[in-house]
Every structure is written in structure tokens, then in C-alpha cells.
Image (cartoon, rainbow, N blue to C red):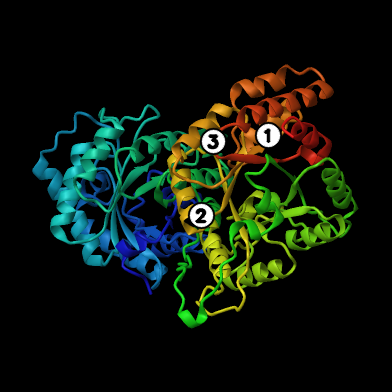
Amino acid sequence: MKRDFRKRLKEGVIVCDGAMGTMIYSKGVYINKCYDELNLSEPHKIELIHKEYIDAGAEIIETNTYGANRLRLKPFGLEDKVKEINIKGVQIAKKAAGKRIYVAGSIGKLSTTFDLKLELSDDMVREIYGEQAKALIEGGVDLIMIETISNLKRMCLAIEVVKEIADIPVIAQMTFSEEGVTHYGSTIPEVTRTLDGLKVDALGMNCTTGPQQMMENIKVMAKNTSLPLSAQPNAGEPSMVDGRYMYLSTPEYLAENAKRFIQYGVLIVGGCCGTTPLHIKAIKGAVKALQPSRKIKVKVTEQVRKKDKIEVIPHPEKSPFARIINKKFVTCVEVDPPRGINITRELDAARMLKDAGIDAINIADGPRATARMSPIHIASVLSEKVGIETIVHFCARDRNILGIQSDLIGSHILGLHNVLLVTGDPPKLGDYPNATSVFDVDSIGLVKIARNLNMGKDLAGNPIGKPTSFFIGVGANPGAIDIDEEIRRLYLKVNAGAEYILTQPVYKPEFLEDFLKKIEDINIPVFVGILPLMSYKNAEFLHNEVPGMSIPDDIRARMKRAKTSSIAREEGVNIATEALIACKNLPKIAGTYIMPPFGKYDLAIKVAKAVM
């Protein structure tokens, strides 16, 4: 059964459907026909489109009523069928939706073309919108979606009349040009503040632009409201192909941009012109990976009965790694697990790093969502055979809350007490894009679970006997797109029990310095991430295609000037060494976390030697 839409909106991202018009056209209905009238003459065709979007993962479907007002219907001689077309549109959508999908009553602009000379009094606008809204509400929609409006005054009138008819959720979506203004000259801040004052349930934008430009517009909107945002871009810009306009943006492209929309507070994401069920399916996959619709709320109980009093392990006693922090500048190097069962290369790397004086090695957990040996198992072997401290990366992507606790307890028994708890790259980024993500919790939830175990209790509050002694680390990205959100989440991690921080690669010390100033009241050690670049191509790939990575223009320019591979490698080491030396004496910096490119551990050692 559906929850109240307003309650559902507070729970996380909702995927809306895509373009009804695009789908109708793809089924052989030419554009000179009234698409809204198909509710009466071809209801099965409309129902099929709804079902295709639902099967793709849409949680909201919009009625086929975008142009079902008397002005838009008049050229077809259907102005007296407003109520009939709208109610039938709701009935078709509700039949397809069943009991779990939300039906949004779609209300669009009043004219078929942009026409500044169209004279309509406020009373007439209210009457036209009111006629359509009454029919949609009578039909039983779950919410009203007022969309693709470029006239701010008419949007306000439409919202007001809907609210007068019924207490029903309202989503208001304006349409903006690439310059961030409506056809009538209203700016995004002006529109946002005005609609915010009308207490709509969500506001946003759709149509006109593709995802990249809409992203820039959403950023502006996000700065001017605290309301949930909605974004439904076109599938890029249309191109003329064999005499027909075609939208050529791939589903994968829209999905990647959907993830960025979510970073800026978008809670309703879907598509407009050119988007199909394939696009919505890809968006749904991206949303599921980033923010599953069902989250496990982790509540950590710290107080215990006197008779069950637990002696929590002090920081210095948790591991040799924890013990040396603040006594020296600590060096760590990342070692990726093998893709198969041969660990000769990893053993050789661990021995080489230990002989070079490296303090610990980090074992990644399925980096870039690839299938590799479990970091727990490889870390256990390397620790036993080489005698070097390990930091095990542990992500939420692949385990439910039962598996998380089982693996953590098992790790502790194996003597693996240093952990880096991360959410994990979504499968879409790796070799298995159709793999199922779990994400019962994110990195914050992982920290809470580990801290709970350190207090001698599992997630349900059941005693586990002797407490674990995990030394809990978390990640942070000083170069995050939304730095305020990154810092907000970091504070949540620290409050949940994080004891040290490993950063994403830093190339500009001043970026890290600014970041540290913003977290000056966080008093746990920070390890600066360093990744030597191998080539200009490597730098461009990391900057443009790896989530969370940002390499400044001047750094990429330095790599571009390197004429040979050996010179480029040397320049990459120089850049990394310069950054590390400059960062070493910044407040909170307790050590470094070096990520050798392509397993070039000699480069990692060369950089580390500069501060050892």
C-alpha cells in the first residue's frame, strides 16, 4: 500500500516517469493528433506506456493530461470534454499504478506556443486551471504536478486554485533557458523565492534543457529554498536525423547526471522530452545505488546495565597502528586485492613496503565496483606472512546488516582491527552494472555498527561478550562538489564514532587547508590522500570519469607538458611529493595515505621517503 505522499517525500529520492509524448509518438501516433484525447479513443495504448514506466522503476507516473485544458483542446474541437478527458486519464493511470505507485495529475501550460500576446485575465486563468484541477482531483490523483510553466504569475494562480480545491500535495515545475531565466524573464532566484512562499510540497524544473544545463540551474535554485527539489530534464538537445528530431542522450548519461542532481537536494527525479523507460530504468538504478528507498535506521545504545558493564578498549590499545599515531608521521600505502587466487604480487608488494619503512597498508574493498578477493582474507594473509599492519576497507554495498556484523566480528577475531568504513562505489561504475546493491546502511550507519560492537553489543542491543576493538576510520573529500554536504556528513560520521579520517587525493594543499579550517572543531587525526599521476591521459581520466576526484587545471597542464612517459611519471611524483610536503605540517595531519597508480609501489615509496 502507498504511504501518504508527503510522508514518502521525507523518506528519500523518488523516481518519476519520463516523456509521455515521446512514447506516444514512438508508437506511431503523429504529432497532429491530440495526445490527451487518446485517453478516450486509445486508452490501452496510454495504459501500456504507464506500465512500461512502472516496470522501469518509476514510483510516480503522470496522467496523460498535460494539455487537457480548454485552451489546448479547443483547436481539436474538444474544449467541452475537459472533465471527461482528465478523469479518464486518471482512471487509466490508476489502473496501471495499482496500490503502490503514485499518480500525479499533470497540468501544463495554457497555450500550445509561446505567445506574449495571449491576453488572459487572472480570473480566466484561475477558471481554466480550476476546471482541469477539479477533474483530476475528482478522479483521485495522489498529487498534482504543475509543469513546464514559463509564466510565473500563471504558476502562482494555478497553485492557489489547486490549494483552494483540496489539500493535496503540489509539485511546481517551471521551465528555464540555458541562461537561467523563463521565457517571460523571471530569474531562478525570483521564481524560487516566490514559489517557496506559496508552500508547495516540492518545486523544481523540467523541459527546455538537458541534464547538464539543468544541473547548473538546480544549483541556483537549491541556494534559494529549503523545500524538496524536482528535476526532469530533456534527454539532451534534439538532433535532426533523417528528417526527424531525435534525442540522442543515452540512459547512462542521464543516470550519471541524476546522481549529481541528488547531491544538490533533488528528491524527485525523472525525465522530460526524449526520455523513455530505458532512461528511467537507468535513473532508478543510479538512485537505488546512491540512496535506497528503504534505509535501516541504526540506533546505537551506549548505556548498559551495571551488571553488564563493558570495559571499552582505549584508543592506543586497539592496534599498533593506533598506538603510533601522533608519535610519528605515519605512512600508509594502498594495495588492491587480486582479481583471482594468486597473491604472489600482493605478498611481494607488502614485503617491499615493509622493508621501505611503510607503517601500514590499506586493502580496498572491491574498488571501482570490481570483483576481487575479499579484503578481509587478503589482509589476514598479508598480516600473518609479512607482519605489516593492515587497514581493511569495508563497504556497505555488498552486505546487509546481518552480513556486516558477521564480517566485522570475524575480522576482529583475525586480528584485523583497523577498518576504513565507506559506503562503496555503486555497481554501475564497475564490470557488473546490473548487480544488486544492498546499502542497508551507508558509511555513517557502518560507523555506528562498529562502535556498537566496540561497546560489546550488536545492532539489536544483544550482548556479544567481550567487546571488539576496532580502530574506526572514515573517508572525506576536500574537493567535493558540494563541500557543505561533505562536511555535514563528516560531522555525522565523527559523532557516530569515527576515530580517524583518510582524504581523497589532494593536489593543492590550499584546498586541504581550507577544508581543515571548516572542520577545526573535529579533533581526530587526518591522513592526507596522495595519488601520483602517471600521465596526462591518466590525469584527465581521474578528473572526468572517477567519482569524487578533482584534479586542478594547472596540475593537469603540468602533466600535459610532459613529452615522454618517463618525464610524465617523474612529474607525477614531483607533484605528489610537493603536495605531501606542503600538507605535512597542517593542523590535524597525522600521516599520509598513498595510492600507487597501476600498482607502481616504487612510486609510492619514493613519495613517502620525502616525509619519512
**Between tags 2 and 1, which lies in front?**
1
Amino acid at pointer 2 = Val
Mark 2–mark 3 distance (CA, rounded to whole Å): 37 Å
Q: Report helix, strand or loop for mark 1.
A: helix
Please report whichever mark, 2 or 1, sits nearer to the chain's N-terminal start: 2
217 relative position to 607: left or right: left
Q: Residue, x 75% and y 49% (percent of image)?
A: 361
Residue 329 image-quadrant placement: top right
Q: Which of 253 and 194 is in front in this view?
A: 194
Crowd tier of the residue under label 2, counting other residues whose Cα lies within 10 Å: few below 14, some 14–19, many 20 or above: many
Crowd tier of the residue under label 3, counting other residues whose Cα lies within 10 Å: few below 14, some 14–19, many 20 or above: some
Q: Mark 2 points at which residue?
A: 287
Mark 2–mark 1 distance (CA, rounded to whole Å): 24 Å
Q: Which residue lies furthest to the bottom in this view?
A: 307
Label of residue 541 in the image: 1
**Between tags 3 and 1, which lies in front?**
3
545 relative position to 602: left or right: left
Please report whichever mark, 3 or 1, sits nearer to the chain's N-terminal start: 1
**Between tags 2 and 3, which lies in front?**
3
Q: Residue, x 79% and y 59% (percent of image)?
A: 378
Q: Which of 574 and 517 is in front in this view?
A: 517
Considering the image in quadrants, where does the C terminus appear? top right
Residue 7 image-quadrant placement: bottom left
Q: Position of residue 5 (x, y in %)?
A: 32, 63
Q: Please determine whether, in this image, residue 120 is positioned above or below residue 573.
A: below
Q: Which of 310 and 137 is in front in this view?
A: 310
Q: Position of residue 101 (x, y in %)?
A: 40, 66
Label of residue 587 in the image: 3
